[in-house]
Amino acid sequence: MGSTSEIKLPKSELYLEMDLLRFTTAGSVDDGKSTLIGRLLYDSKSIFEDQYEAIKSSSEKRGDEYVNLALLTDGLRAEREQGITIDVAYRYFSTPKRKFIIADAPGHIQYTRNMVTAASTANVALILIDARKGVIEQTMRHTYISTLLKIPHIIVCINKMDLVDYKEDVFNKIKTAYEKFVSKLGPVDLEFIPLSALKGDNVVDKSKKMSWYKGKTLLDLLENLDIKNDTNLKDVRFPVQYVIRPMSHDHHDYRGYAGRIASGIMKKGDDVMILPSGNRTKIKSIDTAEGELYEAFAPMSITVTLEDQLDVSRGDMIVKADKLPLITQDLEVMICWLTEKKLQLNGKYVLKHTNKEVRCVVKEINHKVNISTLENIDDKAVGLNDIAKITLKTTAPVAADKYNLNRITGSLILIDEVTHVTVGAGMII
């Protein structure tokens, strides 16, 4: 290692993750989220024949009049019995153009926390609306959470168009009502698609019954959506996950720092700073299982070696000195509360930020958010599924960014010190 002849540019397969699109589905109960995913998988030929035969058999036993494609994602027994989605169901598929990870989130209000989990890493949110019902409270709730979590793209799927005779005016009324609501949330990258998940209209194949719609099908839109700007490639953030010391004969003095690049581009020879110590050094090498690289970028997993022997541990962060994160012990956070045990003012919690854990105390509960009206309410009782603005004080400095600048270094979770249960998911503001 180390000679110029051994340094290789990233191979094409290392770019594959840039062609991976993560999307989540959200909507009210019975809006057709699971059916839409099932149709997407079936029509894109992403399921095997035996899987199709299994759900066909299950549909017949349930007395369904058609093959219930929702059974592809409704994996829990309780879900199948009730015909709803309770847990977050993840599915993977690919087309010649792109790989996909789908997170099918539940629609009930009491499962808002599951939707937050599903949406936290998504590039795209599919917001489903029943064409018969239009924009309802859950539509607004899921849209607010999507914008709060800074999901870069929102595709509004106006579903069950077959039940309103595929009428263009129904689609336009819902589109207008949704645009009026979302205008309160600031700029959002929006697309609207009229479709029928049950019949397959505009999911993978263009609908012949909605010739008035000139846009793309859902799959076509997902395949061609530009996501290259979704990753922050300006600000170098490399949270150290593990220190590698082989202590072998061939690598006796090797000391590498492994992790996943949260944002930015790292190059051999770059001047970098270690946080929180503030020590400066240069990148000696960037190593992967494929060999040494000249440069690497988010979200690649790499091992970095440094020119100087410094004390660098798990939870430290390697950054460029000219673009530093905020280094602070005082954090203002929008928190989504994930447990029935209420958030305690002056309560002590473990705060996990990237790979770093510190203790913290809740100094202030500023306000809760009424997700339906978007109004701030003076209510200090923060319970399950509530979203509130709070102020935290940590026992040690944290190197963080605002969430709207970096979704990884701008996010955190709170853990109960006694039960070790994750009780809150937060966005640093």
Image (cartoon, rainbow, N blue to C red):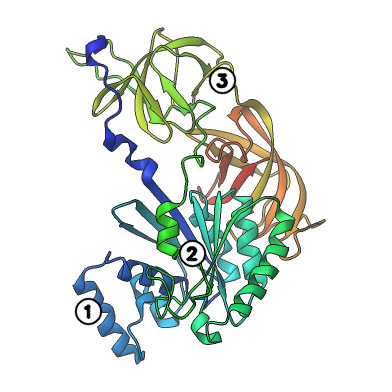
| Image location of residue 303, percent across then percent down | 34, 24
Q: Residue at x 46, y 56 (%)?
A: 23
Disc 3 or 2, which lies upstream in sequence? Answer: 2
Q: Which residue is mark 1?
A: 53
- Label whose residue precedes the other's in the sequence (3 or 1): 1
Where residue 169 appears, as percent x and y from the top left, is 63, 79
Kind of residue at disc 2: Ala
**At 57% across and 37% down in the image, what residue appears?**
406
- The residue tagged with tag 3: helix, strand or loop? loop
Note whether residue 237 is visible.
Answer: yes
Callout 1: helix, strand or loop?
helix
What residue type is disc 3 on? Pro
Residue 70 in picture, x, y percent from top left: 39, 75
Marks 2 & 1, CB-CB < 8 Å contact: no
> First in sequence: mark 2 or mark 1?
1
Depth check, front residue: 143 or 361: 143
The residue beneath circle 2 is 105
Q: Residue placed at 48% from the left, 48% from the top?
A: 121
**Whole-number angstrom distance, CA of label 3 to CA of label 1:** 57 Å
Residue 1 vertical position relative to residue 195 in the rendered view, above or below: above
